[in-house]
Image (spheres, coloured by chain):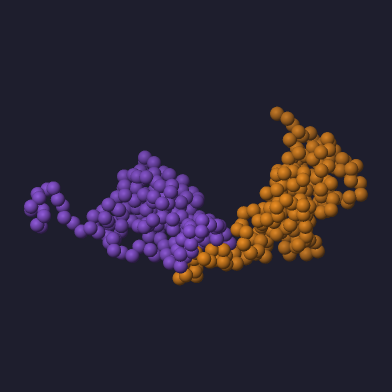
Amino acid sequence: MGLDSMQGDSFVTTKLSALVGWARQYSLWPFPFATACCGIEYMSVLSSDFDLARFGAERPSFSPRQADLLIVLGTLTYKMAPVLWKVYHSMSEPKWVMSVGACASSGGMFRSYSVLQGIDRIIPVDIYIPGCPPRPEAILDALIKLQQRVKKESIKDPRYRGRADALDEIFSGYESGNLVQK
Amino acid sequence: MRELSPDHNIKLKENLAGRFPNAGFKVEENRGIVVIEASRSSLIELMKHLKEDAGCSFNVLMDLTAVDYLDKRKSEERFEVVYMLFSSTSLHRVRIKVKAGDGDDVPSLVSIWKGANWPEREVFDFFGIKFSGHPLMERLIMPDEFRGYPLRKDFPLEGQGEDYLIESILIPDKTKI
């Protein structure tokens, strides 16, 4: 390559997408949306025995504005669904969603009047983890698999995969300063 | 440690018979606990007596809930509101039951125990039994726009399809389970 031979080891030439993908892969900031026992399991993933920080997901973000990865841990009721939806749409692009455990993925054992049968009915999900609750190893495995995927994504890929009309609704809500739960 | 006095239940029954000679309460004993079946109209008076009378002093409302006896008791009213009282001085307990039909109002106990506020709202939320005199008779746990009363025995076990609660945020092609 031209630049490499002229400048020696001072330069590396690459594609912009590959560089950005590499950076995104190792700097996923997770937002733990914990509503049930999977959240307890996630605490163990964060702490020293399993240590999510080894994979670059060092900082759990408790503000959706500064998070890339929404980790949904636990049962989602109909009453809580608009909250999760609002959190997802408050995150800035690029963003990914991990659905941890049977409840978040499908409603789990709660086939009842109050439980949403899977969070993918309201937001797009990138990776599902089976288990009730899953072992910490399963969550780490999912994170690594997601990293492989993030690495391959191009910066030109269309990111938004939800309901565009619903997105307009929330933005009109922000403009009027009226954030009443629907 | 304080001991329960063995003749307390007998004394309680005598006390009630002396105070309410014509009320016609059905009083029985179940596993060492006196169970009083009261009518809706006499409930407030009975509860005040049980709380304030020196011979009773049941000062704690331990629990307040309801049971739906749909089709189990055809001749009688459908619901039964159950009150569990506890005396922190004598350590005895007593249970009061009140029958209520669909649409009947039960008198609220908030004027006697403030702690009855949320349990009564919970009973309204899940059974649809209204409490008259309650300061805020609204749903406690389920969303305000929820249709029906989910702990009634004729409510479908898996729900009646609650997607209307979140219709504006559902992803269209995922609406069918």
Horizontal placement of A151 versus B4: left or right? left
Height in image: B7 above or below A52?
above
Q: Colour of chain A?
A: purple
Horizontal placement of A118 versus A24: left or right? right
User: Who's orange, chain-wise?
Assistant: B
Residue A93 percent coordinates (x, y): 36, 57
Identify the residue at image location x=67%, y=53%. Answer: B122
Q: From this viewpoint, is residue B159 visible?
A: yes
Identify the residue at image location x=61%, y=57%. Answer: B142
Which of the two residues, B14 or B112, is positioned nearer the viewer here? B112
Which of the two residues, A123 or B23, is positioned nearer the viewer here? A123
- Residue most extreme to the top: B1
Quadrant of the drawing holding the C terminus of chain A: bottom right
Residue A38 percent coordinates (x, y): 46, 50
Identify the residue at image location x=83%, y=38%. Answer: B53
Q: From this viewpoint, is residue B158 visible?
A: no
Height in image: B1 above or below A93?
above
Horizontal placement of B150 versus A4: left or right? right
Residue B114 percent coordinates (x, y): 72, 44
